[in-house]
Amino acid sequence: MNGVILRWPVPIGTTINPQYYKKVLQDKLRPTIRKKRPGLLESGILFHHDNAPVHTAGAVTDVLAGYKWELLEHPRYSPDLAPCDFHLFPKMKEHLRGQRFETEEDIIQATKVAIKNLDKCSYVTAFKDWLQRIEKCANNGGCYVE
């Protein structure tokens, strides 16, 4: 748990479709993992994203299968199981609340600072919380958990 590997702001007006997501995986995420966490690609990646159509498109699943990354399952329509939704985004909102931004670059810099200010222990806590949520969801027949 060493924090965020890639922070990639999507340019204004960009449509996130399978081709765009695939390009980010290939051209941004994979090279950044190789640079920031040498050896991790060879030792095995546990990869999690939700079941959005962009993530489950054939072009994307083919790329991930080629990488031999282990995909962690995510039940459909379960935002309660998305770590960003219950960990990262609320913490960023705390940091950014009340601020006004003049430019897109100001927003990008402020989010960069917010992410850097998260301590490494919070990622371990988020991961443990996530595992507990998955277990609760499984024990609840796949229903929403808080």
Image (cartoon, grey):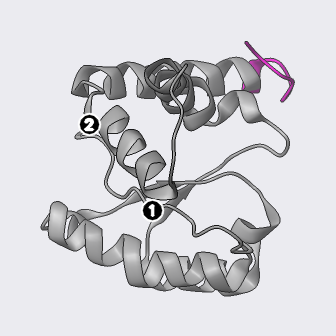
Q: Is residue 32 visible?
A: yes
| Vertical placement of residue 96 versus 47, above or below | above
Residue indicated by mark 2:
116
Check if residue 139 falls in the magenta segment: yes
Q: Residue 100: percent from the left, percent from the top?
A: 54, 32
| Vertical placement of residue 46 versus 16, above or below | above
Looking at the rendered structure, the kind of residue marked 2 is: Lys
Looking at the rendered structure, the kind of residue marked 1 is: Trp
Q: Main secondary structure of the magenta part?
A: loop
In the image, taking residue 57 as reference, residue 11 lies left or right, namely: left
Q: Residue 26: percent from the left, percent from the top?
A: 44, 83
| Vertical placement of residue 122 versus 24, above or below | above
| Numbered disc 2: secondary structure | helix
Residue closest to the eye, 116 or 26: 116
Q: Residue furthest left?
A: 38
Please give the range of residues in magenta: 138-146
| Tag shown at residue 8 | 1
